[in-house]
Image: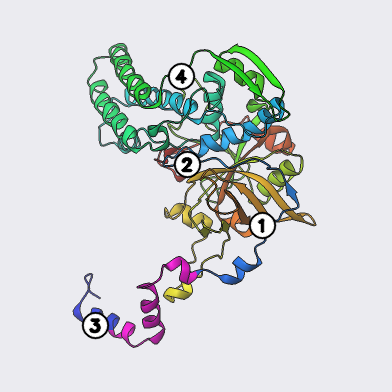
């Protein structure tokens, strides 16, 4: 057969389509109706109940707006549960803008150090090209979130509120990319590392200036007082962000580990791995994953919720989901029936062939347990309160198997053999591996 499409082949395709009434019916429908409306499995929608046997949330959903800060929102939403309890508040948010400011500045420094480290490679080397392509994104990982809290602390949202650019980051990020790519050019021509780092400092001063103009200047100290839900007044006086975090973060962040389900042969179960050149704070800990079976991930997530603590997780959010009604299910859309074909890539193949990746982080705040198994999961998203159940979504358990990739849990919840595996030197995946995708969300 010829490599190119021949007139005869094109005619066969045309006739095959025209002669099939089901195809013509689908054409009539899809030219007037969205695919999601047409392929939605009504039976799944009807039988998906929002109620769960174990419910933690009694607070409002947050809104990351037009930004890729899901990982920061999910992390801060986890921490605010204990802060609200300590302060006896019904409503409270840590400043997402504050941690984003420091992530942007630390990420700029991390990027420039990677450029210095790879200055002896060609600019079209795959790793260098990846670094230059993936500049000033909003995404991140659990370990990166912990590094920011440990180094820069936290402040209440009222102390460093949202700005136009924190809620819509695209234009600011565009300017940061221009500054950093131009800086990368200059660093690659430096005579030695000392000269490069001197030049790096000048670049970071520009980055800091841009961030202050767009996001505001982070406070060194601030005065904190509040009236709790029982109308009692409290005053802490002046605090640094680090002191505020120390006082109101009640979770042992350093004791948390990231578990992932990566079914590819390159990532054996029971082993740790990392993604090359993935991080944000140069002097912070590496991003480390422990690869486990998805059944164990579900067990640990379920136990954590039953014990009263939400669970941070990463997933491929856009697959098999309906935003307005707030449902995820592995079979939510019967797309194959619409197109008369079969979509049969499994989870491993979807990773290998770039059909899936971690794209979003959220919190599990409830689970419906029947016997020893979870039937569905309640999810706190950060897309505001207009969709789903005022911003809280329902995930059927089938979706967890296929599209959840990562959870953060306490180390002591792991079996002894997996705790021992955490000290092993991790397998290093390439910088462009899909397991680092959440940190590259723009």
Q: Earlier in the sequence, mark 2 or mark 3?
A: 3
- Asked if the residue under mark 3 is in contact with the one under mark 2, i.e. CB atoms within 8 Å, the reply is no
Would residue 377 be found to the left or right of residue 159 on screen? right
Q: Nearer the viewer, residue 244 or 228?
A: 228
Q: Which residue is denoted by mark 3 in the rendering?
A: 11
Look at the numbered disc 1 and give the secondary structure of its residue: loop
Quadrant of the image containing the C terminus: top left
The quadrant where residue 398 appears: bottom right
Q: Which residue is mark 1?
A: 50
Q: Name the residue beneath numbered marker 2.
A: 438
User: Left or right: where does residue 249 sit relative to residue 135?
Assistant: right
Which residue is the extreme one toward the front? 231
Task: Tell me, yes or no, whether the highlighted magenta stretch contains residue 91.
Answer: no
Give the left or right position of residue 188, taking residue 365 as reference: left
> Does 54 appear above or below 339?
above
Q: Quote the CA–CA distance across marks 1 and 2.
A: 27 Å
């Amino acid at each position: 057969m010829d490599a190119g499409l021949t007139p005869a082949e094109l005619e066969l395709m045309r006739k095959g389509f025209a002669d099939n009434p089901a195809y013509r019916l689908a054409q009539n429908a899809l030219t007037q109706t969205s695919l999601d409306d047409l392929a939605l499995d009504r039976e799944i929608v009807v039988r998906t109940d929002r109620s769960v046997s174990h419910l933690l949330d009694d607070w409002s959903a947050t809104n990351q707006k037009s930004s890729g800060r899901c990982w920061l929102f999910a992390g801060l939403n986890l921490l605010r549960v204990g802060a609200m309890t300590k302060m006896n508040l019904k409503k409270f948010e840590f400043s997402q803008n504050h941690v984003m400011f420091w992530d942007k500045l630390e990420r700029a420094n991390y990027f420039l150090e990677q450029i210095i480290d790879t200055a002896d490679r060609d600019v079209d080397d795959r790793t260098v090209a990846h670094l230059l392509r993936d500049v000033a994104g909003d995404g991140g990982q659990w370990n990166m979130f912990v590094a920011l809290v440990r180094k820069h602390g936290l402040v209440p949202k009222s102390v460093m509120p949202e700005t136009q650019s924190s809620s819509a980051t695209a234009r600011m990020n565009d300017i940061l990319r221009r500054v950093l790519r131009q800086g990368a050019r200059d660093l690659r021509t430096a005579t030695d590392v000392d000269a490069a780092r001197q030049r790096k400092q000048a670049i970071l001063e520009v980055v800091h200036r841009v961030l202050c103009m767009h996001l505001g200047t982070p406070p060194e100290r601030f005065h904190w007082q509040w009236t709790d839900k029982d109308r009692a007044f409290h005053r802490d006086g002046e605090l640094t962000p680090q002191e505020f975090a120390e006082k109101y973060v009640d979770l042992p962040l350093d004791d948390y580990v990231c578990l992932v389900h990566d079914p590819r042969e390159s990532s054996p179960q029971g082993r740790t791995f990392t993604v090359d050149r993935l991080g944000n704070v140069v002097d912070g800990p590496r991003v480390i994953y422990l690869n486990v079976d998805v059944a164990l991930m579900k067990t640990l997530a379920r136990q954590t919720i039953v014990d009263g603590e939400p669970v941070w997780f990463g997933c491929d959010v856009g697959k098999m989901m309906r935003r307005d009604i707030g449902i995820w299910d592995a079979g939510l859309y019967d797309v194959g029936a619409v197109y008369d074909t079969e979509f049969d890539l499994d989870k491993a193949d979807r990773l290998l062939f770039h059909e899936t990746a971690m794209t979003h982080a959220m919190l599990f705040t409830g689970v419906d347990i029947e016997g020893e198994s979870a039937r569905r999961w309640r999810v706190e998203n950060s897309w505001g309160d207009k969709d789903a159940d005022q911003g809280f979504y329902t995930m059927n358990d089938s979706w967890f198997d296929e599209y959840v990739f990562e959870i953060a849990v306490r180390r002591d919840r792991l079996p002894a053999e997996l705790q021992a595996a955490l000290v092993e030197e991790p397998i290093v995946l390439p910088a462009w591996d899909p397991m680092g995708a959440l940190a590259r969300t723009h």
